[in-house]
Amino acid sequence: MQVLVTGCAGFIGSQLCERLTERGDSVIGVDCFTSYYAEQRKRANLEKLKDRPNFQLVEGDLLVIDLKNLFSTADCVFHTAGQPGVRGSWGEQFDEYVRNNILATQRLLEAVKSNGGHTKVVFSSSSSIYGNVDRLPVTENDLPRPFSPYGTTKLAAEHLCMLYHANYGVPVVSLRYFTVYGPRQRPDMAFHIFIKALLQNAPITILGDGRQTRDFTYVDDIIDANLAAADKPVAGEIFNIGGGSRQSLRDAVAFLEKISERKANMDSRPAIRGDVRDTWADTERAKIYLGFQPKVTLEEGLKRQFEWEKTIYPRQD
């Protein structure tokens, strides 16, 4: 299969590219190396791909580069690129979220449409589109009510995907990820911060009371869902992708204390605006249509992430 992966140097995109090349697909990866976090870290994510003959890196902005030629032979596009994070989506930075989450997605869909509309698009959406819900677990039929500007832009991009499917027959699948973690996790994400703090004997800052819950999903399970969405005969569909590991932040820290054999020094601060109280995915549709079932438990996934972070943050006694 000829594949295009946007955001190929990111946490999820880089590992998706590795799995695709390992199974024999020809992959073109696109990334503009935004300044959201260190470019050096993103380039390190691509290290395993550098010498693979079936991987090609294209450095460029989706709103600038010639997408039509890139799509000319692509069977599938995995659109993992985007501006992440709830906290940064307020205020003047919202322009970046509109640009990188909405406008870039629209231009990508236009390029697919202009090439005949046959290239499948697997879009990386987010549980942030739901906001604070009245009941859990949440299903794909529940009304989206984003609680942050970030969630609003991801929902807008989802709507764009669906309207290009409805009007032009573009075969799209949107995957709503629930709190992804694992090796290469972005440095602004909670587990990355917690593990770094434990390794360096620094305080762990908990935003809110720490009893808020998340449906934590290991990155390998996310990649399994992407591959299934590409390979299965589904289009015009939306799926929740959760890890089945709903825990509170304090419980997750307890797992990390056990793994690191260190007691966490926790410091509580007010919750950030836009941060929802609880998430929990009903993944029955993904199980039926994609054969998706999460395989990695939270404790096992945190062990793997801890081992990875030990390679970049020396343990301090």
Image: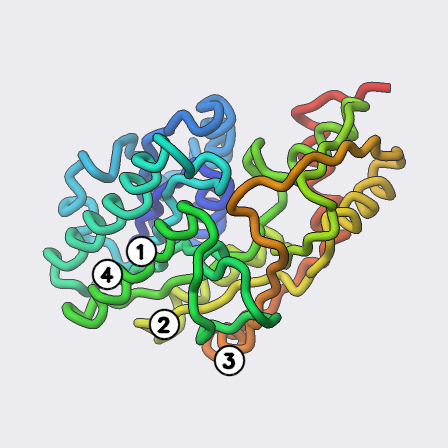
Gap in angstroms between the C-alphas marked 4 and 1: 21 Å
Q: Residues within 10 Å of mark 3 (few under 14, many from 20)?
A: few
Gap in angstroms between the C-alphas marked 3 and 4: 23 Å
Q: Quadrant of the C terminus?
A: top right
Residue 22 against residue 201 in the figure, above or below: below
Label number found at residue 237: 2
Q: Residue visible at 35% across and 75% down?
A: 233
Going by the numbered disc 2, the residue's amino acid type is Glu
Q: Residue visible at 46% across and 77% down?
A: 289
x then y, percent, for residue 59 = 29, 30
x then y, percent, for residue 227 = 45, 61
Residue 112 against residue 69 in the figure, above or below: below
Q: In the rendered image, which residue does mark 3 sit on?
A: 288
Residue contact between numbered discs 4 and 1, judged by CB atoms under 8 Å: no
Label 4 element class: loop
Q: Quadrant of residue 155?
A: bottom left
Q: Residues within 10 Å of mark 2 (few under 14, many from 20)?
A: some
